[in-house]
Image (tube, rainbow, N blue to C red):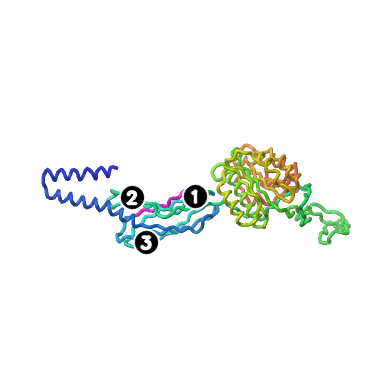
Amino acid sequence: MKTRIFLIIIPVITLALALAGGFTLLWRFLIFLAVVLLASYLWPRLSLRAIEGKVNINSEGCQVGDGLEEEFTVTNRSRLPTPVIELEEDTDLPGHRNVTAVSLWSRDSYRWQSRADCRQRGKYRLGALTARITDPLGFFPLRRRLGKRRDVIIYPAAPDLPFFRALPHPSFPPGPGRRLLSETGPNASRVRDYNSSDSLRHVHWHTTAHTGRLMVKEYEPDRSDYAFRDVWIVLDMYRGSRRGEGDETTEEYGITTAASLARKYSHAGKRVGLIASGDRPYTFLPEAGDRHLQHMRQALALMRAAGDVPIDGLLASEAGRFGAGSVVFVITTSDNQGIAGPLRRAVNRGAMVTVILLDSLSFGGDTGASRTARGLVAGGIPVYVIRRGVPIARALDSRLASSRLPYVGDKV
């Protein structure tokens, strides 16, 4: 603003002095000043009008922890060289800023590459450039938008869960419609006397030598190998359940867990469904295939823990969907101690239920996971516990399950 005031004052004073004194030098200076101002006004405008921008992005989406490769090309279509142009990408992607300055000769172009780190799930804009240009004296700054804006979805991270499986209670009855693929699990629970129907490969030779009788190992049934048809993922997105700050929240841990489970069972050829009540209701009926998985991933990328329906109410209203031939994974915070009733009804209908508790205490809440987990286990519902700072793949490692206390995670 001050610069423009001087642009008005200086020519006016020069003109007044030239008229008053009639000095030829002042008239020449006034003409020179007018030419400079006219050139300063026209050059940036003509240059900016001839500038074209193009942006290529290698993918329309990536997941948290990955990166997007961008390539920018700016071309001067004019016969005139340009002043210095400042180019800044117009983006709201967290932690990403892309700024460069370039001066182009006639018919010249400039190309550069940039990597956008995907740090936070959501929908963001990328691609468009804001070009700022001014004359050498800085009198007439201009800006113009180059290229087209693109919306990019950043999907939640989905770490592999190689050792995760549903953990049935030892007393869990096989419901109708299930076929037991393997009655022999990986863990021997005790030894007993040999029967004629036992396989010799199960003989416990150390005990046999000690007792003088042929003894065999008895295994816990591996009920995770039931040929269930459907996988249901029920995610707690109630606003009152959210704990933590920044990226270390129960919301982010829960969504990452749901994404990992959906990916695991979709790639295994299972039909996967998703239910959540967040910023809006989300219901995906069980289907198989990559396209269905992509739709669920997109929903998880945009979902917010802003729901008005608590998890116990959500389970009660959706319990009719869970029956024989289905496995249900419930992801919720440890504050919710009222979920046992709806889950028990699902179990009675023949569903196989596993609860994944997000330990609220580790996220800054008031309630730890111990009491809720023990209550669920006492009711015949196995539990995993995820704590802040513990890798999800480790927390969901079924090898850490104890035969005495069938819930896993770090010690309470």
Q: Residues within 10 Å of mark 3 (few under 14, many from 20)?
A: some
Image location of residue 211, percent across then percent down? 87, 55
Q: Amino acid at mark 2?
A: Leu
- Label at residue 363: none
The CA span between labels 2 and 3 is 20 Å
- Element under label 2? strand
The CA span between labels 1 and 3 is 28 Å
Q: Amino acid at mark 3?
A: Ser
The CA span between labels 2 and 1 is 26 Å
Image location of residue 409, percent across then percent down? 67, 47
Residue located farthest toward the left when viewing the structure as drawn: 22
Residue 332 visible here = yes
Above or below for 223 versus 4? below
Residue in the foreground of this view, choosing between 284 and 252: 284
254 drawn magenta: no
Q: Which residue is mark 1?
A: 124
Identify the residue at horizontal 43%, vertical 50% (top origin).
90
Q: Amino acid at mark 1?
A: Tyr
Q: Which residue is mark 2?
A: 142
Residue located farthest toward the bottom when viewing the structure as drawn: 107
Asked if disc 1 and disc 3 are in contact, CB closer than 8 Å, the reply is: no
Above or below for 120 versus 195? above
Image: magenta residue range: 85-93
Above or below for 211 versus 308? below
Q: Residues within 10 Å of mark 2 (few under 14, many from 20)?
A: some
Residue in the foreground of this view, choosing between 145 and 338: 145
Position of the C terminus, as image quadrant, is top right
Residue 209 visible here = no
Q: Which residue is mark 3?
A: 109
- Element under label 3? strand
Position of the N terminus, as image quadrant, is top left
Q: Is residue 112 left or right of residue 317?
A: left
